Image: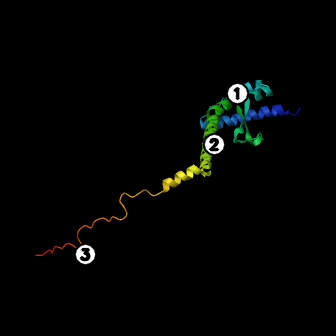
Amino acid sequence: MKRSNLSEELGAALLQILELQDELDRRNGEPVEPIPREVAKALTPSQIRSLFEVDHYPIRREMGGTNHPANLHFRLWKAHRVKTAKRDVPEIRKGERIWRANVEHALAMTDKLCLPSLEEIKAREIRRQKPKHRWPKGRKIANRGFDGNYRPMRQKTHAG
């Protein structure tokens, strides 16, 4: 008997993966249309392979993911495009917004750390000077008119 070639083995593996993926995706609420066995029997290995696209999962290529087999995941082309449009692209854009905000913050912090100009130093010194008092220094506030030992009389209560 003739040994199967790599293309035929890849086609068989993809069909088996699709069956497993269909079961998992049904649990997650993502519809996947499996290829019925009778239809798959009529397809050639290259036709089966053309139904799939390679998804870089769990680490996206934009985030530094490689083409190592452990980072590649076969998906039907339609499911891959839906996942890319609805999950991957929004997450990538959010990461870009966060990165941009971090860069702007870092630039603002470096601007604060830069040495100020001579004009800025003079302006700060002028602001630091104590304001002039409203009352001249030699004037005292007048006394209330009684000495500090004054205590009002206590009223005696008669128990009776």
The colour scheme used to paint the residues is: rainbow
Does 151 appear above or below 19? Answer: below
The secondary element bearing badge 3 is classed as loop
- Label located before the other in sequence (1 or 3): 1
Q: Amino acid at mark 2?
A: Trp
Q: Residue at x 57, y 49 (%)?
A: 119
Does 137 appear above or below 44? Answer: below
Quarter that holds the C terminus: bottom left
Q: Residue at x 36, y 61 (%)?
A: 136
Q: Which residue is mark 1?
A: 36
The numbered disc on residue 149 is 3
Q: Dot 2: few (<14), some (14–19), or many (≥20) neighbours within 10 Å?
A: few
Q: Which residue is mark 2?
A: 99
Q: Residue furthest left?
A: 160
Pointer 3 with pointer 2, Cβ within 8 A? no
Seen from the viewer's position, the closer of residues 133 and 151 is 133
Query: Which numbered mark, 2 or 1, is in the foreground of this view?
Result: 2
Distance from the alpha carbon under mark 2 to that under mark 1: 45 Å
